[in-house]
């Protein structure tokens, strides 16, 4: 989560898409990373 926080504070795109069109939120939710999901949502991730 700390790494994600650093990237988001540096203005990394919260809704960046990978080659399969998945976002960081897809991965955080898929792996059950509740704290990371909350962080992404706080930074405006699209649901």
Image (tube, rainbow, N blue to C red):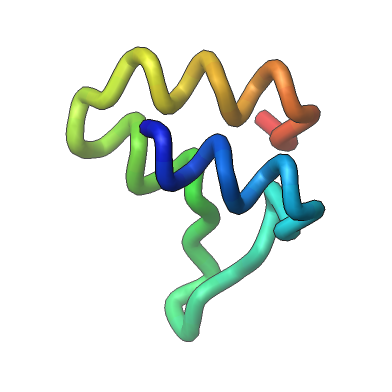
Viewer-nearest residue: 9 or 32: 9
- Above or below — where is 38 with respect to 25? above
Q: Nearer the viewer, residue 7 or 23?
A: 7
Residue 43 placement: quadrant: top right
Residue 7 % position (x, y): 60, 52
In the image, farthest residue toward the left: 31
**Taking 7 as reference, is 38 left or right?**
left
Horizontal side of residue 18 vs 45, given as left or right: left
Q: What is the count of numbered marks?
A: 0
Q: Quadrant of residue 13?
A: bottom right
Q: Residue at x 70, y 53 (%)?
A: 15
Q: Position of residue 4 (x, y in %)?
A: 48, 43
Q: Is residue 45 depicted above or below 27 in this figure?
A: above
Q: Which residue corresponds to the image point at 38% horizontal and 15% vertical from the top-left?
A: 35
Give the side of residue 17 with respect to residue 29, left or right. Answer: right
Residue at horizontal 46%, vertical 23%? 37
**Quadrant position of residue 21:** bottom right
Q: Where is residue 36 drawn, in percent x and y? A: 41, 26
Quadrant of the image containing the C terminus: top right
Give the residue furthest to the bottom. 19
Picture coordinates of residue 32 (x, y %)?
21, 24
Image quarter in which the N terminus is found? top left
């Amino acid at each position: 989560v700390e790494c994600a926080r650093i990237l988001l504070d540096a203005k990394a795109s919260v809704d960046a898409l990978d080659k399969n069109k998945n976002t960081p939120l897809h991965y955080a939710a898929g792996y059950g990373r509740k704290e990371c999901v909350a962080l992404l949502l706080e930074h405006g991730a699209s649901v």
